Amino acid sequence: MRRTLLLLVVFLISCGGEPDPTPAPTLSAEMAAGHTVYQANCAICHALTPDTVVRGPSLYGIGTRARQRVQGMDARDYIYMSILRPADYLVDGYENIMPTNLAKDLTGEEMDAVVNYLLTFEQ
């Protein structure tokens, strides 16, 4: 009886403490592909955290801001065009340093994946 009580106490003590952190959500295949494209081509200049400037503007909230950047253009089209013709969509205060070859270097699937990935970043 005493041994059983001791084991119960040890068990209860070992179960206490901080709960395990919530695991990060699993990305769909397309979102994982978009994340990979972002990491390989965008992260060198653009952060995904608020108010963080690497070289270009932060892309935190781009899914929301892109809807408001050009009147009559939805967020998806704005992000595509910003990648295809970056000089036409410069954000005030930033230099025209974005590569212009991404449309040639990325496949259509990669472009779709990274645009869809970026659209998930809303404020």
Image: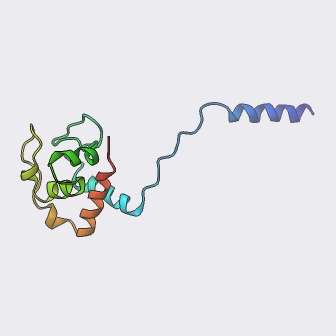
Whether 97 is drawn above or below 85: the answer is: above
Q: Position of residue 83 (x, y in %)?
A: 16, 56
Determine which quarter of the picture holds residue 54: top left
Q: Tell whether 67 sits left or right of 9.
A: left
Residue furthest right in the image:
1
Task: Compare residues 75 and 97 and report the one nearer the observer.
Answer: 75
Q: Position of residue 100 (x, y in %)?
A: 9, 58
How is colour applied across the structure in the image?
rainbow
Residue in the picture at 27% in, 54% down = 38
What count of labels does the image hold?
0
Q: Position of residue 17 (x, y in %)?
A: 63, 30
Whether 19 is drawn above or below 78: the answer is: above
Residue in the picture at 24% in, 36% down = 52
Task: Specify the quadrant that holds the C terminus.
Answer: top left
Q: Position of residue 99 (x, y in %)?
A: 11, 55
Determine which quarter of the picture holds residue 34: bottom left
Q: Tell whether 102 sits left or right of 87.
A: right
Q: Tell whether 106 sits left or right of 116.
A: left
Task: Compare residues 4 and 35 and report the one nearer the observer.
Answer: 35
Whether 64 is drawn above or below 40: the answer is: above
Task: Specify the quadrant that holds the N terminus.
Answer: top right
Residue in the picture at 27% in, 68% down = 109
Whether 102 is drawn above or below 52: the answer is: below
Residue in the picture at 53% in, 39% down = 21
Residue furthest bottom in the image:
108
Residue furthest front in the image:
72
